[in-house]
Amino acid sequence: MNDVVKIGIAGLGTIGSGVIKSLLRNQSDLEKKYKFKFEISGISASSKNKERSFNASSFVWFDSPIDLARDSNIDLIIELIGGDSGIAYDLAIEAIKNKKGFITANKALISSHGKELSRLSEENNSFIGYEAAVAGGIPIIKTLRSGLVLDQIKGVYGILNGTSNFILSKMSEENKSFEDALSEAQILGYAEADPSFDINGLDVAHKLSIINSLCFAEFPSIESINVKGIEAILTLDHKYAKELGYNIKLTASSFSDGGSLRKEVSPTLVEMGSSLGRVSGVSNVVCINTDYNGTIILEGEGAGEGPTSTSVLSDIVDYSSNNKQYLFNKKFADLLDSKCNNSVIDRCYYLRVFLVDQKGAMSNLTSILGKNGISIDQVIQRGGVHLKDEKNFTPVIMITHPIDSESIDSAFAELINTDLISMDPIFLPVLKDNL
Ligand SMILES: NC(=O)c1ccc[n+]([C@@H]2O[C@H](COP(=O)([O-])OP(=O)(O)OC[C@H]3O[C@@H](n4cnc5c(N)ncnc54)[C@H](OP(=O)(O)O)[C@@H]3O)[C@@H](O)[C@H]2O)c1
């Protein structure tokens, strides 16, 4: 490798601009601390003449990001465009085939093409860094790639999407509606113009699939994860959850369970004072259950220019120290295709229905639950709270005793075919975590 690392940066938006400013600001510190010298040898984005938060005219402009990867003067490509296909994918392949180092903050790319990238990086002996792709500034990838070398990981769980956590926190702490909390997130720049992946759980699923590969030697795949988003959660769910001692969070979890893996993204009730229950606003948290180190908890900023740029810089320093590792901790040949999880475990669920206000309704509801093996630990039923325009339905909240998900699915299917309820019921798992 050259003494001076020649860098090409594709994508000059929030993160791309942040990385350039951070590199320039920390140039002499990087040289002193890591003996790392660099030159930004080319930049590329969609529009050359767009106003940027740094002086773009002082760098060589490339109309096509692909040409950065073909330039023999450039050692390291940093992809900060986004998307799992198109230009980001083409750039990754071109960079690796041309034996360049490749760094990205793009979880969709690593998750969707992990298998191919793992094979190609091995064949070409290339460096691929993706610290910024999961949980912004939290060094979760490094922790899993090199921090727990001999430890056995039993499970990993956490909050991996700042936008959805911000929305749920605003609903819970300030009684806001989902729509108001989302528009506040958009005004503050936390949510994309199209926030669907943040809300429907797919952004978290991409991140979980990457973490899962590092922990359990599977190629990433979101198809093998049970994914549920936060769209159906109402402000009143937060109110009742709090009454019962819980907060509602969009959680990701992957647990090794008797030989199979249970992977899930779902709104979940977590104890208010627990490591997940305490995390508010745009923060993220990841908990790793290990054999030798107990539970390791990493918490911090999950997105944004500053934290994400720091993670990209840490990959650049790794590249400069020639720190090459297998993409997902293991050789391509030792990784398995990820399997759908059919394992069934018993756990408590939060159930909310809007029950028709008529004689015998409660007993019909409990009889459907009972028929499916579901017994109730706690119940809240209050008159006077109604759905807009549906004065005949009032909310009933229950916490079940531990039960498997098949019984929950079967009760759900039965309930939605009755006249007992208005709106689909929601069943949310309850996570017991006293940490
Ligand atoms: N924002 C965050 O907090 C955050 C956190 C973690 C990870 N990430 C990841 O970081 C990556 C970048 O995110 P971002 O928030 O910085 O996005 P962004 O602000 O939308 O910037 C995207 C950049 O890509 C450029 N671009 C788009 N299409 C292009 C094309 N066909 N050819 C060349 N350049 C193209 C845009 O060019 P113009 O500027 O000319 O329009 C822009 O500079 C994504 O993978 C994202 O998931 C972001």
Image (cartoon, rainbow, N blue to C red):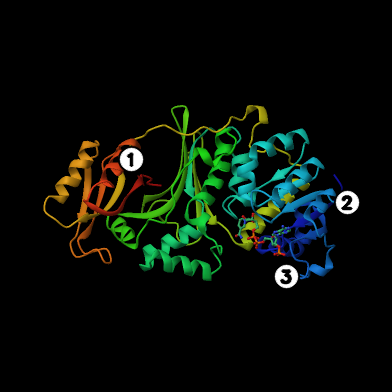
> Do labels 3 and 1 touch, CB within 8 Å?
no
Determine which residue is flagged by label 1.
409
> What distance separates the C-alpha of mark 3 from that of mark 1?
51 Å
Q: Quick one: 303 or 356, which is closer to the camera?
A: 356
> Do labels 2 and 1 touch, CB within 8 Å?
no
Residue most extreme to the left: 359
Asked if the residue at label 3 sits under 8 Å from ligand 1, the reply is: yes
Q: Quadrant holding ligand 1?
A: bottom right
Asked if the residue at label 2 sits under 8 Å from ligand 1, the reply is: no
Is residue 270 positioned above or below 123 on the image? below
Q: Residue at x 61, y 49 (%)?
A: 107
Nearer to us: label 3 or label 1 = 1
Image position, residue 131 (x, y; %): 64, 49
Is residue 288 positioned above or below 62 on the image? above
Q: Quick one: 135 or 197, which is closer to the camera?
A: 197
Which quadrant of the figure has residue 409?
A: top left
Choose the circle earlier in sequence order: 2 or 1: 2
Image position, residue 249 (x, y; %): 41, 54
Choose the circle earlier in sequence order: 3 or 2: 3
Determine which residue is flagged by label 3.
52
Q: Amino acid at mark 2?
A: Asn
124 sits to left or right of 244: right
Q: Amino acid at mark 1?
A: Asp
Determine which residue is flagged by label 2.
73
Q: Amino acid at mark 3?
A: Arg
Q: Callout 1 environment at 10 Å: few (<14), some (14 to 19), or many (20+)? A: few
Q: Quadrant of the N terminus?
A: top right
Q: Residue at x 47, y 29 (%)?
A: 260
Say which element carries label 3.
Answer: loop
Nearer to us: label 2 or label 1 = 1
> What distance separates the C-alpha of mark 3 from that of mark 2?
25 Å
* Label placed on residue 385: none
